[in-house]
Image (cartoon, helix red, strand yellow):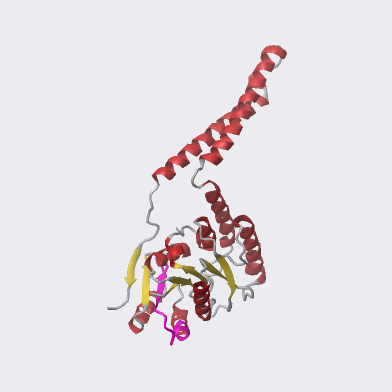
Amino acid sequence: MDLSIIIPLLNESESLDELHNWILNELKNKSIKYEIIFVDDGSTDNSWHKIQLLNEKNSNIKGIRFMKNYGKSQALHAGFIKCSGKIVVTLDADLQDSPSEILNLYNRITKEKLDIISGWKKKRYDSIIFKNIPSKIFNWAARKVSGIKIHDFNCGIKAYRSEVVKNINVYGEMHRYIPVLASNKGYNKIDEQIVIHQARKYGVTKFGWSRFINGFLDLITIWFLNKFGKKPMHLFGLIGTVMLIIGFFSSLYIGIDKLYFKTQGRLITERPEFYIALTTMILGAQFFVAGFVGELIIKHQTNTKRYRIISTISNKK
């Protein structure tokens, strides 16, 4: 298989026929073996039925149906597991990502031997206040933290070499940071390409303001996992050691001061410095425990199933 096209979707039945036909028009008369994998992330409309009908017309259509809405990251993860193409292209089902970009991305990533090409919606048709400005702030922060110089981390249309998607674990809401996850695995040949962004034609967006808040929180998580994910004791142990040392020497100072210099002064337990020192030592010990627990979790962690698939559609024999 030369090309896998993975399309996560939630309640996008109105756009599926048009999207499918558009993709076919782009790929017709091309000597490319391809598959289109629709991942239905718990749609409550007619989306799954539409995918079944498309499969009857086109044997290159595959489908994965989740029992409920688990999120875009889980949908992409399921698609990455199922796909078999040498090059993998992802795009959203709402027609805001143009299928006309697929061949450009495919040809470029093949010729230039890149790991990832991320789309850049330089000209957007979203709300300036509620989407464009927050998106620019979010992408600026992501560039600063990750060191990856791309402009649109959250763009739905991206191209990958198969090896990349098979070796990254997309979970939670980390689909925004797939280039960062890949870079952490050593796949650093990452570039971007300006792509056409189109106004939404059907339905409404499935993402609200919370995605920007969650995005920044996920960015902090990515930074932490990259720095200390394999050795949490390096962070928690350092903080714990510093706090224990401060608490110990503060307590020692208070004790010496009471025994030898201010013997007639207030009781140690009446001095606020005593409680500050005691609290510092307790917190230091807790950070140490957190570090040990983190090490034990990493040592004994297992991969758990994060979603449940209730139906699949494969190529017809």
| Residue farthest bottom in this picture | 29
Give the residue at x 34% y 80%.
59
Where residue 244 sits in the image (x, y, percent)? 58, 29
Decide if residue 127 is on the left or right side of residue 317.
right
Instruction: Say which quarter of the image contains residue 201.
Output: bottom right
* Magenta stretch in the rendered image: 23-43
Q: Say which of 183 and 298 sits in front.
A: 183
Where residue 45 sits in the image (x, y, percent)? 42, 74
Kindly tell me whether residue 91 is visible in this rendering.
no
Q: Say which of 185 and 291 sits in front.
A: 185
Where residue 182 sits in the image (x, y, percent)? 50, 60
Please say whether residue 154 is one of the residues in the magenta stretch: no
> In which quadrant is the N terminus drawn?
bottom left
> In which quadrant is the C terminus drawn?
bottom left
Give the residue at x 46% y 41%.
295
Please say whether residue 29 is one of the residues in the magenta stretch: yes
Question: Is 261 rendered above or below residue 275?
Answer: above
Counting labels gives 0
Decide if residue 215 is on the left or right side of residue 17.
right
Question: Is 160 rendered above or below residue 60?
Answer: above
Where residue 297 sits in the image (x, y, percent)? 43, 43
Kindly tell me whether residue 300 is visible in this rendering.
yes
Question: Is 294 rendered above or below residue 14?
Answer: above
